[in-house]
Image (cartoon, coloured by chain):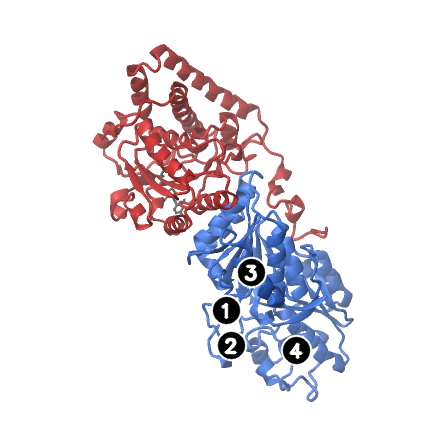
Chain colours: A blue, B red
Amino acid sequence: MTVMSYLGAIGAAQKEAMLADERVVIIGEDVEANVYGTTGGAGKSRASEGDFLQQFGRNRIRNTPISEEVIVGAAIGAAMTGLRPIVDLSYSSFLYMAMDQFVNQAAKNRYMFGGQASVPVVFRSAMFYGLNTGAHHSDRPYPMFMNVPGLKIVTPAFPSDAKGLLRTAVDTDDPVLVFEACVLWGSKEEVDEREYRIPFGVGRSVRTGTDATVIAVSGAVPEAVAAADALAPEGISVEVFDPRTLVPLDVEGILDAAARTGRVVVADPAHRTCGAAAEISALISEHVFDALRGPVRRVTTPDVQIPFSPALEKQLYPNRVAIADAVRASLGVAAPTTGRDGDDSTGPDGSGGTPPSGQDAAVATGAAR
Amino acid sequence: MTDPAPRSLPRDTQLEMQRRMLRIRRFDERASKMVKRGQIPGTVHTSIGQEAQVVGACMALGDTDFMTGNHRSHGHPIGKGAPLGPLMAELVGKSGGVCQGKGGSLHLADFAVGSLGESGIVGGSIPIAVGAGLSSKVLANDRVSLAFFGDGAANQGCLYEGMNMAGVWKLPVIFLCENNQYALSTPAHTVTSGVIADRGSGFGMPGVRVENGQDVLAVHEAVSAAVQRARAGDGPSLVEVITYRYNEHSEGLRLGVDYRNAQEKAQWLARDPIVLFREDLIRRGVAAAEELDALEADVLREVDDAVAFSDQSPYPELSVAFDDLYSDSRFAVHRFRDSSFGTLEAVR
Ligand SMILES: Cc1ncc(C[n+]2csc(CCOP(=O)(O)OP(=O)(O)O)c2C)c(N)n1
Ligand SMILES: [Mg+2]
């Protein structure tokens, strides 16, 4: 085991995949110079072996023109004819440039050609939300793609998952979109430096608990853990479950986790309407309604564009305060007036005092309504 | 108007060209009738009138070379040598269809002959062809890739992203513009700035205009040069072929306005590529009239057989609607009448 950062784990998985299979190529803007930090090679190995370009050469590490539509389309065509490309699309907000190729080609080609096409391609992109990059770089667009049958959607929240899920993605004969949250880039974890793969459709029980369940996605996972930590001293025991892949979705794992406590909060950094949280909430309501002891609550980013000013942006995403408030609301308990997580930077009313039912606070924090 | 094309191809190749042009003509004529009789659901876009352009290009490719196309879709796989039965069954929506009834006319594909798929999205398959060229380059397997697209698609941005990428990476790609002078009702000159072929030079590649796209040998010659260049590692080419479609944009379409005048139509009808090549073959002594008559009869039988193949093929079972969405059908979590995304079964 080695301590790896989230970004380092992605780089490690890419290197493993490049070494394991000649058909794997990495294409994207600025990948040669390792601008986004996953094609450099880590620490010692970089010093001795060089970066990816030096190790694998220009035939397999390809800087592309800034042409997202043909980057995505060509990767699909290459995948249909013998390569297994990993495409680095840098920012998730740029995926829209290639929407036609994702939706009309990547997702449909196997199906509409009656199984003749195999499309083994991975599209990686980073969600730069919470970093004051403004409206054109902060998107968390995975729900749009969950709405497109034929695509697989992966949202790792931990370094070990980022590595194991990316290896599985490269092995998969279907188009896979990996959404990486930049807020997680620096997070560290003990990671097995040997090759391993994590199956799609199997969630991760991050923490067990008995009073309430938080199903959390991507960057909301560590916030859910922090909320669970904050609630423990109040005598509230919270289970945190991370589906890890949104398509396929670990429906069983989600339903089990939900039914175990009967009080459920779904935390999802995407916009609320038709988001991942909406789908997960609906599944829980449809399948384990009888086990619920209250309505499923969603903590999401409200349906608003992302403003630049740090004063406006930071409280929009599901954070530990909003998640903890939602858990208390589901349990029908008020926040303690003291002893609450008082870190102002985590929310507008992080110092507490606002009852969980306070409508304004709930809306402002994206908390459950 | 006529390019002096070499008439020195092997006799068998020339006869095969005529056979494939006839296959397209008779197949599309039959498909048109079947649409009008309700035997083919939806509509089809025929390549009638454009056979020389299609076959000249396809036959400049090798069997293992790749090709992508568009909504005017039947000619491309036929030109590449696909058998007619599974194509016809696909148009009808039968299980014996080349795409098992999932694609239909707009989305034909026959990977066995290098046909990577037609596209209902104008321009949408061009990047796919670029990607096939990228594969060939990275894997060094000497395969060439050709993208068919119309004059209308020539104004899609993805073409230029694709030409730039193929140019800078020297990919073995041929961008083949089928300029039939109209995009649905819109005359190309009213929406196209400059000459399409001239756009090649902007990307550092040859841009060739085949003025007489009704001459299969002229098309074949131009595309062969592009193929040769691609195989030599010299990169992509743009070939624009001037041609004309005889039928309406799609079968059954009735527009209130006549956007093409009768005189223009008559002029192009007088330059029927199949008639012209037949006369040429006879004049040059490549084939006798009787031989060509026999070939025509042969092709008619092939089309009859294709319809018979389709007729005897059953419609697909309902359950296959959920196959081939993913590499493993367990990943398609919905079934008919499922209440929600996901079932209680594991979807690992
Ligand atoms: C992206 C997109 N826009 C519009 C259409 C509707 N449409 C289908 S075919 C066509 C005309 C295409 O003209 P051209 O590319 O010249 O091909 P042709 O039909 O002449 O062979 C149009 C507008 C479409 N299918 N896809
Ligand atoms: Mg046209």
Foreground tag (4 vs 1): 1
Local secondary structure at mark 2: helix
Local secondary structure at mark 3: helix
Which residue does the numbered mark 4 point to in the structure image? A325
Residue at mark 2 to residue at mark 4: CA–CA distance: 19 Å
Foreground tag (2 vs 1): 1
**Would residue B48 be visible to someone looking at this image?**
no
Answer above or below: position of A339 versus A214.
below
Q: Position of residue A187 (x, y in %)?
A: 63, 72
**Which picture quadrant has residue B281?**
top left
Label 4 vs 1, first from the N-terminus: 1
Which residue does the numbered mark 2 point to in the structure image? A313
State yes or no: discs 2 and 1 in contact (Cβ < 8 Å): yes
Three-letter amino acid code of the residue under disc 3: Tyr
Three-letter amino acid code of the residue under disc 2: Glu
Local secondary structure at mark 1: loop
Q: Are marks 4 and 1 on the same chain?
A: yes
**The one of B287 and A333 positioned closer to us in this rendering:** B287
Q: Chain of mark 3?
A: A
User: In the rendering, which numbered label is found on residue A142?
Assistant: 3
User: In the rendering, which numbered label is found on residue A138?
Assistant: 1
Residue at mark 4 to residue at mark 1: CA–CA distance: 25 Å
Q: Are marks 3 and 2 on the same chain?
A: yes
Three-letter amino acid code of the residue under disc 4: Asp
**The one of A100 and B309 positioned closer to us in this rendering:** A100
Q: Chain of mark 1?
A: A
Residue that appears at 27% across and 39% down: B257
Residue at mark 2 to residue at mark 1: CA–CA distance: 10 Å
Residue at mark 3 to residue at mark 2: CA–CA distance: 20 Å
Label 3 vs 2, first from the N-terminus: 3
Label 3 vs 4, first from the N-terminus: 3
